[in-house]
Image (tube, rainbow, N blue to C red):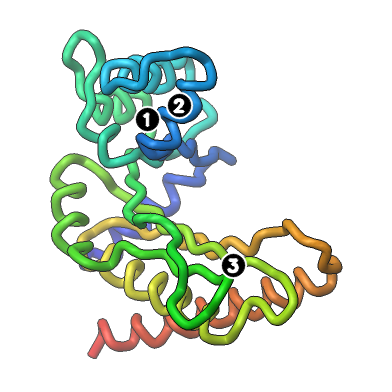
């Protein structure tokens, strides 16, 4: 693990008040939106759409990094130029979404855990070879009566920590995204309490993983 390289990448992602471009929309989600507009749900249509995004004039002036999807990171412009190269030449750091979505958490009705740890080490190595320098993993926490449970919070925090540790070993900066949804009839104070609890659990889970890496 090259700590200096990881730090340089992390700093570059947010340098000069720049942000991250989330173009990691999955194929099914993209196809669903295309269908609503009468656009063909094909690989070529998705490629052309994404080319419009990566070739936006002066995009690098406000975007420090772009989060890509598995299909997207392998695609090219119509002239054969890889999207990765287009982004890098624009001063944008390529990244990749590596989680495989939130699925129902067994034993915890109404709650979800994000999956994707199986085979992640090998996938990260491949993405690194393709040119990715950071990765993203999103956990989804909902609020309702008796939810979230401690089990749900712990499961998602541990998955985020394992993902982050594997990313660093592969030389990729991990973007850790524990998202507490605001939807519901709960109060603002309740949302604050849950968010604080989730962030604390994520922090402690990652700290424990970090110490293991140093042993």
Dot 1 or dot 2, earlier in sequence: 2
In the image, taking residue 161 as reference, residue 109 lies left or right, namely right
Is the residue under label 2 in contact with that under label 3 (CB below 8 Å)? no
Tell me what residue is drawn at x 58 percent, y 61 percent: 179
Q: Is residue 198 above or below residue 51?
A: below
Quadrant of the snapshot with the C terminus: bottom left
Mark 1 touching mark 2, by CB under 8 A? Answer: yes
Q: Find the distance from the CA under tag 1 to the CA under tag 2.
A: 6 Å
The residue where tag 2 is placed is: 60
Q: Is residue 192 left or right of residue 53?
A: right
Q: Is residue 96 above or below residue 44?
A: below
Q: What residue is drawn where x is 43% and y is 63%? A: 103
Label 3 to label 2, Cα distance in Å?
32 Å
Q: Quadrant of the N terminus?
A: bottom left
Tell me if I can see residue 51 in this picture.
Answer: no
Instruction: Say which mark, if any, is on residue 91.
Output: 1
User: Which SS class for mark 1?
Assistant: loop
- Give the number of marks: 3
| In-image side of 94 versus 32 (left or right) | left
Name the mark nearer the viewer: 3 or 1: 3
Residue 98 in view in this figure: yes
The residue lying toward the viewer, choosing from 163 and 156, is: 156
Tell me the SS state at disc 2. helix
Mark 1 Cα shell of 10 Å, populated few (<14), some (14-19), many (≥20): some
- Residue 100 location, x and y as percent? 35, 55
Compare marks 3 and 2 and give the one earlier in the sequence.
2
What residue would you read off at disc 3? 141
């Amino acid at each position: 693990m090259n700590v200096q390289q990881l730090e340089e990448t992390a700093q570059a992602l947010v340098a000069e008040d720049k942000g991250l471009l989330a173009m990691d929309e999955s194929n099914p989600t993209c196809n669903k939106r295309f269908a609503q507009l009468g656009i063909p749900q094909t690989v070529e249509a998705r490629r052309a759409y994404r080319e419009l995004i990566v070739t936006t004039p002066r995009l690098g002036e406000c975007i420090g990094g772009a989060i890509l999807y598995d299909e997207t990171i392998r695609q090219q412009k119509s002239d054969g130029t890889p999207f990765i190269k287009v982004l890098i030449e624009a001063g944008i750091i390529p990244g990749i979404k590596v989680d495989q979505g939130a699925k129902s958490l067994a034993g915890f009705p109404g709650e979800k855990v994000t999956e994707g740890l199986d085979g992640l080490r090998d996938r990260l190595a491949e993405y690194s070879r393709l040119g990715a320098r950071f990765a993203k993993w999103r956990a989804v926490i909902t609020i309702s009566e008796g939810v979230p449970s401690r089990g749900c919070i712990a499961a998602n925090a541990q998955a985020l920590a394992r993902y982050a540790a594997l990313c660093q070993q592969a030389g990729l900066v991990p973007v850790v995204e524990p998202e507490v949804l605001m939807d519901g009839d709960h109060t603002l104070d309740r949302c604050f309490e849950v968010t604080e609890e989730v962030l604390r659990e994520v922090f402690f889970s990652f700290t424990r993983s970090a110490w293991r890496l140093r042993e």
